[in-house]
Image: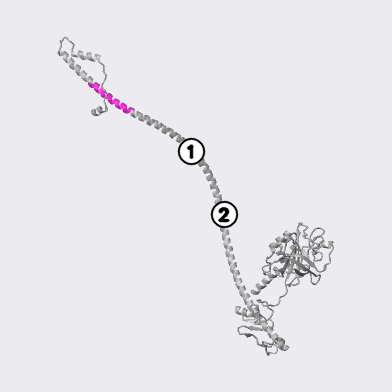
């Protein structure tokens, strides 16, 4: 809405430039109330205190503790203050251990949204000084302060003799340290069991307790006196332009707009939403935008059943008391009828929503049961698969072991075969070498045999020639013998004797070797 946007813009503008001095009060208004002034500055350098302005009242003290829980260990003390000029918000004053913690806190929380319930943001400013009007709280002695207990955990709040209450001495900037060297505002409480320092918070009514303890308190009131800051009701204004006169409220949705004498936002709401009826907040009259008149110009009196005319232009203050009472009674009956109609519509709508959501719940239950059944089936299948996987894993392990043994045997066998193959190769080389020698020898023998065959053929030829020659000689000898016997008594030597003498003195040298050509011719 435009009004909400303008309101947020104004709030942001106010927070961006805070007044230099904030008037505040703290403590229970019915008891000890402390008033003071808080001096602010936008510069955070060399500051040990921060102020959070205009924290909305829907942020309870416990919500604020949860909001600041991240830096609880770095906060020394936290005070809640009431701004005298703001009704629906309060301020917070924080004291830190050192400047580093303050800088980190400012970087983390400055501009951070408090809650999703509203657009309000955390705006931080340096608190340069705090002035308290008089010393309204009586100081306690050291023994009573040291024995003060947290009202929630009942542990002793060991503040080292320095109180967290607002006094003039505590906020005197000229005296910011105590005898033990701590900051005069507040000392952090130490846990006796763990030795850890626990931060303290001072509520709007002035009671001190641990931040961690108050964060667990679920009420908006103080755990001690039940005092709490409640939001003040705001006056009716137009939701568009925020004027407070001539206001009309829509009977359908509750929208508040200004009348025709101002900026006609109520009429614009009717044109935008077609919500017909609107009631004037000042007089209670109901206007019908469709009929362009008031709904009840003539109202029946409930006491005497008379018809009372309600004038448009005359206000209720100008009629007599009886007419005013009758009009008021009629108005009340009208309001009751409208409320009854509204309640019936709300009841019917709630019944429809209940049936709708019950149907959705049943569908969600069915869907959940279906998903659960599917998950159970998947779990069953997964269990079976896991069991099968374990069986296969066991079988594969055994198979791998067997294969490992077989591989070892195969490796040994392969090694042996490689040795045999090497031996066979050497033997084969030797055999090949022997075969080569045998082939060479066989070739030589074949050549010798061929030579011997040739020589044998030649010898046979020679023997034949010799045989023929001997036969010829025998023939010649025989013929010579025959001649000698015919020529006998010759005084000289015979022919036979001549041949014998030639043979006796001769040498047989054989015949010339036959050539291959001659042998072929003879064959």
Q: Position of residue 78 (x, y in %)?
A: 75, 64
Residue 201 vertical placement versus 346 (above, below): above
Going by the image, does 374 lie left or right of 177?
Answer: left
Does the stretch in magenta take in 484? Answer: no
The residue labelled by disc 1 is 418
Does the stretch in magenta take in 462? Answer: yes
In the rendered view of the protein, which quadrant contains the N terminus? bottom right
Q: Please provide the residue range marked out in magenta.
A: 448-468
- Residues at discs 1 and 2 in contact (Cβ within 8 Å): no
Any part of residue 105 in sight: yes
Judge by depth and name the residue closer to the eye, 255 or 391.
255
Going by the image, does 495 lie left or right of 33?
Answer: left
Q: Position of residue 521 (x, y in %)?
A: 23, 28
The residue at 28%/26% (across/down) is 457
The residue at 20%/13% (across/down) is 498
The residue labelled by disc 2 is 387
**Res 218 quadrant in image:** bottom right
Q: Give the main secondary structure, helix, strand or loop, of the magenta stretch.
A: helix
* Dot 1: element: helix
Judge by depth and name the residue closer to the eye, 370 or 277.
277
């Amino acid at each position: 809405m435009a009004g909400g946007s303008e309101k947020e813009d104004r709030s942001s503008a106010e927070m961006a430039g805070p007044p230099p001095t904030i008037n505040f009060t703290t403590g229970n208004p019915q008891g000890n109330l402390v008033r003071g002034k808080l001096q602010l500055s936008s510069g955070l350098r060399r500051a040990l205190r921060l102020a959070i302005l205009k924290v909305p009242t829907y942020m309870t003290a416990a919500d604020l503790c949860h909001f600041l829980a991240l830096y609880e260990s770095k906060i020394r003390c936290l005070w809640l203050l009431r701004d005298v000029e703001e009704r629906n918000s309060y301020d917070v004053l924080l004291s830190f251990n050192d400047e580093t913690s303050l800088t980190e806190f400012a970087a983390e929380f400055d501009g951070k949204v408090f809650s999703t319930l509203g657009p309000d943001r955390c705006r931080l400013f340096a608190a340069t000084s705090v002035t308290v009007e008089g010393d309204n709280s009586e100081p306690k002695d050291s023994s009573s302060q040291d024995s003060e207990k947290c009202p929630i955990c009942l542990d002793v709040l060991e503040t080292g003799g320095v109180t967290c209450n607002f006094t003039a001495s505590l906020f005197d900037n000229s005296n910011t340290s105590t005898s033990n060297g701590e900051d005069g505002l507040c000392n952090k409480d130490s846990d006796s069991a763990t030795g850890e320092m626990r931060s303290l918070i001072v509520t709007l009514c002035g009671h001190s307790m641990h931040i961690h303890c108050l964060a667990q308190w679920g009420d908006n009131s103080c755990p001690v006196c039940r005092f709490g800051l409640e939001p003040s009701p705001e006056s009716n204004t137009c939701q568009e332009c925020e004027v407070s006169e001539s206001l009309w409220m829509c009977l359908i949705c509750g929208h508040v707009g200004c009348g025709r004498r101002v900026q006609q936002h109520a009429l614009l709401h009717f044109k935008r939403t077609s919500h017909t009826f609107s009631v004037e907040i000042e007089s209670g009259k109901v206007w019908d935008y469709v009929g362009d008149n008031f709904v009840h110009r003539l109202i029946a009196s409930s006491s005497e059943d008379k018809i009372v005319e309600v004038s448009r232009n005359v206000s209720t203050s100008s009629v007599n008391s009886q007419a005013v009472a009758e009009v008021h009674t009629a108005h009340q009956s009208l309001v009751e009828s409208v409320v009854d109609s509204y309640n019936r519509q709300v009841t019917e709508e709630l019944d429809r929503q209940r049936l709708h959501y019950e149907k959705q719940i049943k569908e969600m239950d069915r869907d959940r049961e279906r998903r659960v059944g599917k998950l159970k089936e998947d779990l069953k299948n997964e269990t079976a698969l896991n069991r099968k996987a374990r069986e296969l894993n066991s079988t594969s392990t055994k198979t791998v072991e067997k294969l490992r043994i077989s591989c070892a045997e195969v490796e040994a066998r392969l090694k042996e075969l490689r040795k045999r193959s090497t031996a066979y190769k050497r033997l084969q080389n030797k055999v090949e070498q022997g075969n080569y020698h045998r082939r060479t020898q066989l070739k030589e023998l074949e050549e010798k045999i061929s030579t011997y065959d040739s020589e044998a053929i030649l010898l046979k030829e020679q023997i034949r020639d010799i045989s023929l020659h001997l036969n010829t000689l025998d023939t010649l000898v025989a013929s010579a013998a025959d001649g000698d016997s015919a020529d006998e008594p010759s005084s000289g030597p015979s022919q036979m004797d001549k041949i014998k003498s030639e043979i006796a003195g001769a040498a047989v040298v054989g015949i010339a070797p036959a050539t291959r050509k001659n042998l072929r011719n003879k064959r």
